[in-house]
Image (cartoon, coloured by chain):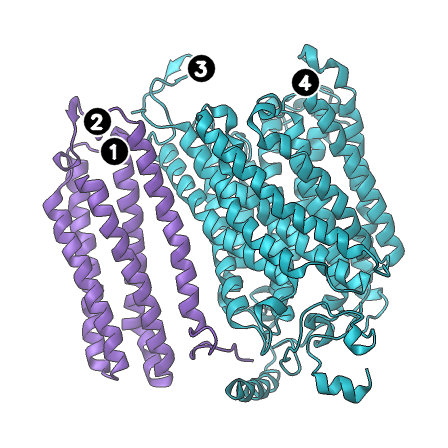
Amino acid sequence: MQIPYTTTARPDTGVYNAKLGVWFFLASEVMLFGGLFSSYIFLRIGAPVWPGELGGEMYVRAHDILNVPLATLNTMVLIASSVTMVMSWASLMMKRFDRYRLYMGATVAFGFVFLIIKAFEYGSKFEHGLFPSESNFLAIYFTMTGLHALHVIGGIIVNAYFLGPGAKMWKTNPQQFTNRIEVAGLYWHFVDLVWIFLFPTIYLL
Amino acid sequence: MAHEASGTTHEVAHEVHDDHHEQSFWRKYVFSTDHKVIGIQYGLTSLAFLFFGFCLVMLMRWQLAYPGEPLPLIGQLFGDERMPGGTMLPEFYNQLGAMHGTIMVFLGIVPLAVGAFGNYVVPLQIGAPDMAFPKLNMASYWFFFLGGVVMLSSFFVPAGAAKAGWTSYPPLANIETMGQTIWLFGMVFLITSSLLGALNFLVTIIQLRADGLTFFRLPFFVWVQFVTALLLLLAFPPLEAAAVLQIMDRLADTSFFMPSGLVVSGEPLDIAGGGSPILWQHLFWFLAHPEVYVLILPAMGIVAEIIANNTRKPLWGYRLMVYSLLFLGFMSFIVWAHHMFITGMGTNLSAFFQVTTMIISIPSVIILSALFISLWGGSIRFTTPMLFALGFLPMFGIGGLTGLPLGLAPPDVHLHDTYYVIGHFHYVVAPGTILALFGGIYYWFPKMTGRMMNDMLGKIHFWGTLIFMNGIFFPMFIQGMAGVSRRLYDGGQIYEHAQGVLWLNEVMSISAWLLALAQIPFIINLLISLKKGKEAKDNAWDATTIEWAAAPSPPVGHGNFVTLPRVYRGPYEYSSPEAEDHDLPQHVPPKQLVAEGA
């Protein structure tokens, strides 16, 4: 038995199964982060001052607490990783497997760089006694960026699999492998996009 | 099209090839990727959970009918921390209440309606060899199973299972014992399961429809599963967000749902504060109102199939029903705050949600009316599934109409959190959805097993269930209008205003236990018919939809159909005037009909 349209597009819908599947998955992810962004707005509207009091001091701007230069650097890193992700897919479309490995390797590496910078950011917060329990501002900061970091980790695992053992499929079924990279790419761009919203919302506004 | 036809023959060749592989017991029945096996797994598991959830409420009904009296015979078995000397402790009562709701909704009805019927029937009705992602389908079942195990395990942790109701309102839920944390993690598993299931259904329905099966030729049941999957896909994530926030509140001491200055048992809590309990309610009901439609829509789909089949004529207003369904699905996302009229969210917001709530009743009424009108002029076969479908119509009608006063803010102020509310949503879900689900079991059992269920036992089951369900839920309206609150450990004994209606507690409890007895014929019927039931022909009910008309009963192990069907017409062409009042199955080509002289 074979499931129809696993590698080729269905003529009347114009997509193959996995591509449609990942779009639906991303729709559900939009609702997940949408719920959290709404919670952020709800809490912020209800607070007399935002970010409010922390360790006896009153803060009125988020960037007095958070490290904007590091987060800007991280934004650059994620955008770069999105570019290399597209390049890896494009390389497969051009049947250049060697270049695919190069670009996919870079994507995974950028993912790690993002996480390392994030870890430094978290670490310096903890050093100064800034834990999620201290205020709702820190709570929503850690929850949203933490959940986003989990999504980055998930993406790294998927991409690393396609760089390593998963890449064997290139020899047996190149079309399906290319599809898989396209689908993984859609997810990776989404994770990038979440950060593009998170960064201004939490750090700058 | 020519391309697809060649693909079809290729697949059949494959399937014949595949059949030579003997699968191990584990691959075939436990970790199966076949949608039919997964559907049956979902069915058996969820029936077991339905029974378990029912047992929980039967224990509660003892306490409500005879408060403080020891439960005879089995009361001692529950241990001193739950029922010392056989008398139920308030803490245990609260556990039973919270877990009854959780289990019935998330582990009983949804997995039966969507996981079991959806999984088994949808690929067959659209002429697909399987779901689009068989491995995800298996993962979805096992996440569900794991979520169920986690939920059950919470009964055995210190201080027992969650006690804050199935709605888990903070701040109470935040300061609850360990069971609540387990409840939250259990929910995360169940949400993951429903997410995987939902996107699988959506892709399957869009991508794997047979040749010629356009959207407006889909059986109504497929449409219903399509909209249900959309609701699950988009409504559950905000609850997952809420669960994450509550987990943070409980484990990392954040204050998302904790207001400033909260005092518990005379002690001010050492927390940052500044959060809002109302935020939880918004996130929760953003899921839980669409969830109501997740509970009821599959039931409407099953009833539509059974009614069309047993009246031997097309559904009245099929297109209108589909449009109503889509509108209903959309509207269900903007009515959630009608659960929150008394939270003080303001009259403008109340007015908005009042209006949307009144609007959403229109498509429900259209669907129900269309089903009633479909009966008109039909030569009705009163088979067991048809009895359940006919029972569904007025029962859902009562459930729906009693919801209208709750959707309007002024009467809701009086009725909120009373037994009236309990009566209302149970009428929708129990005599409504559960009757339809029973009907579905009787209707598709021959498809799954190749044998018929016993008609006599089925009819006894139907009448017992119908009568005793009304015995349980109708008195709730009377109690509720008298002002008796829900979630009272003693059933309202200490309230002066409740005294006149307290005697109904015993009526309801006895009805509940009799309802349990009425399920015995069903269980016997299910077990005996498996082996000894009358053998069914492939198209046991002479249906026109392709799961019956084009596939053997039970369908072929791999790939469902001997050859993948092609569809030429709509789903319910019964007694068609185009063919001298013969039925026109969806897959029979027009030429062949002429050749057969039909």
Would you say residue B108 is visible in this rendering?
Answer: no
- Left or right: B205 in relation to B525: left
Q: Which residue is label 2 attached to?
A: A52
Q: CA distance from mark 3 to mark 2?
A: 28 Å
Residue B251 screen position, x and y as percent: 36, 35
Q: Are marks 4 and 1 on the same chain?
A: no
Residues at circles 2 and 1 in contact by the CB criterion of under 8 Å: yes
Disc with the residue nearer the chain's start (3 vs 4):
3
Residue B103 sits above or below residue B480 on the image: below
Residue B463 screen position, x and y as percent: 85, 45
Which chain is indicated by disc 4? B
Residue positioned 77% across, 29% down in the render: B508
The amino acid marked with disc number 4 is Gly
Which chain is indicated by disc 2? A
Residue positioned 40% across, 49% down in the render: A31
Q: Colour of chain A?
A: purple
Residue positioned 27% across, 61% down in the render: A189
Residue B129 screen position, x and y as percent: 59, 75
Q: Which residue is label 1 attached to?
A: A137
Number of other residues with Cα within 10 Å of mark 2, as a class: few under 14, some 14 to 19, many 20 or more: some
- Looking at the rendered image, the disc whose residue lies closer to the viewer, 3 or 2, is 2
Q: In this orientation, which residue lies closer to the viewer: B541 or B159?
A: B541
Residue B472 position by quadrant: top right
- Looking at the rendered image, the disc whose residue lies closer to the viewer, 2 or 4, is 2
Q: CA distance from mark 2 to mark 4?
A: 45 Å
Q: Which residue is label 4 attached to?
A: B492
Q: Which residue is label 3 attached to?
A: B265
Secondary element at image label 2? strand
Letter of the chain in cyan? B
